Image (tube, rainbow, N blue to C red):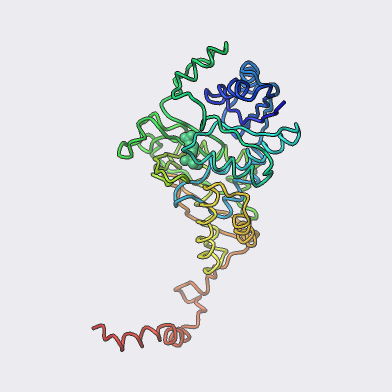
Amino acid sequence: MKKIVLAYSGGLDTSCIIPWLKDNYEGSSIIAFCALLGESEDKNELKKRAKEAGADKFYFVDMRKEFVNDYVFPALRVGAKYEDTYLLATALARPLIGKYLVDIAHENKAEAIAHGCTGKGNDQVRFELAVGALDDSLEIIAPLREWEFKSRKAELEYLDENGLTLADTGGGKYSIDRNLWGISVECGELEDPWVSPPEDSYVIVTPAEDTPDESKELVIEFKDGNPVSIDGKKYNGVELIEKLNIIGGKYGVGRTDMVENRVVGIKSREIYEAPAGEILFEALRGLESLVLDKEYIHNKRKLAKEYGRLTYEGKWFSPLREGVQQYCDATSKYLTGEVRIKLYKGSATVTGRRSPYSLYTEELATYTEKDSFTHESAKGFIDLWGLPLRVMGKRDKKT
Ligand code: ARG
């Protein structure tokens, strides 16, 4: 008898996968696993549905804390985005789900894992790379890449034939993936990259036109690169993100609209909402500018791009991603201090920063009588710094 652990969401596809696996893998036993990552989920309802669909066992794991501490905050400390825009909410959740799929497979001596991702998306890549990196012996089953159903209607009919009724919610206008760190919205009208995101595609961020006319300032405190308090009040990571999502959302912060390059080569249009992520990303950059030296910051930015790409492309469990993490974390102890950030009609702007590790030296920067900079040294410095340019200028006679 084959035991299969399924990444189950309770939606139409994964509900259909349960009887489909039973039909196609005779005598199989299905362990449905549902991850709580910050979306609102009804555990009992999901369990009931999974069992009705034929699941033999059901797991519901609250992974929010682990998600924040081991995936979200590490990526924040690096300053990772994909293609300069996407804060990677969906992409960061996948390796964690993959890790649990493997752990649950081991716990139950299962031989295979299954997921409900399509053959066109990034998530199949992420799940399968994560599972492969952690246990290459597990078989991977991706029903959506092989089954015969061509539409939601066909899937509903199949459920019906199996004596299962799932209320047809129509699947909604959009495909939405949601967790604490952000919301990814695609499909429907958004498939035309020229169409402005319709009002109803906003989930938690208020359109800038409807936000308060007054701005709001927040003071965010960081310790070792992780945010720990807002306006002097301490929060754990999960609470802090939840809180900033609400405040940021109210001020219209954290909405992006992009055409991105998927792993499989397709361009797709997706809109994202990540109010907490955007505020924290900007705030941490504000702190970095004060405490890290120029060369380190410049290099960190390049590596952050690489880290964002690796995460997006499913290579979370790779030596390069882990190495970049170590490079960035080598200075995270200096990322301790406070940042003041102003939220106003969709923007989050740093308006102040301070830290016990500040490299900012007022006597050097000031234009007042307090100035202690050695002005005479600048001449010799510029002579040498510009020497090659002068030599080339003479050769090329540019004027
Ligand atoms: N494009 C994003 C990514 O690859 C999100 C994918 C899921 N999006 C969705 N609306 N279901 O990480």
**Which of these two is toward me, 197 or 294?**
197
Residue 158, how many percent across, how many down? 52, 16
Q: Quadrant of residue 101?
A: top right
User: What number of labels is visible?
Assistant: 0
- Quarter occupied by the C terminus: bottom left
Residue depicted at 53% across the width and 74% down the height: 363
Residue depicted at 50% across the width and 34% down the height: 118
Residue depicted at 63% across the width and 32% down the height: 35
Q: Quadrant of residue 7?
A: top right
Vertical side of 290 occupied by 398: above or below: below
- The reply to whether residue 77 is visible in this rendering is yes
Please indicate whether residue 206 sits to the left or right of residue 110 in the image: left
Vertical side of 317 occupied by 66: above or below: above
**Which of these two is toward me, 90 or 42?**
90
Residue 122, how many percent across, how many down? 50, 41
Residue 47, how many percent across, how many down? 65, 21
Q: Quadrant of residue 102?
A: top right
Residue 350, how many percent across, how many down? 48, 53
Vertical side of 51 occupied by 355: above or below: below
Please indicate whether residue 63 sits to the left or right of residue 285 in the image: right
- The reply to whether residue 275 is visible in this rendering is no
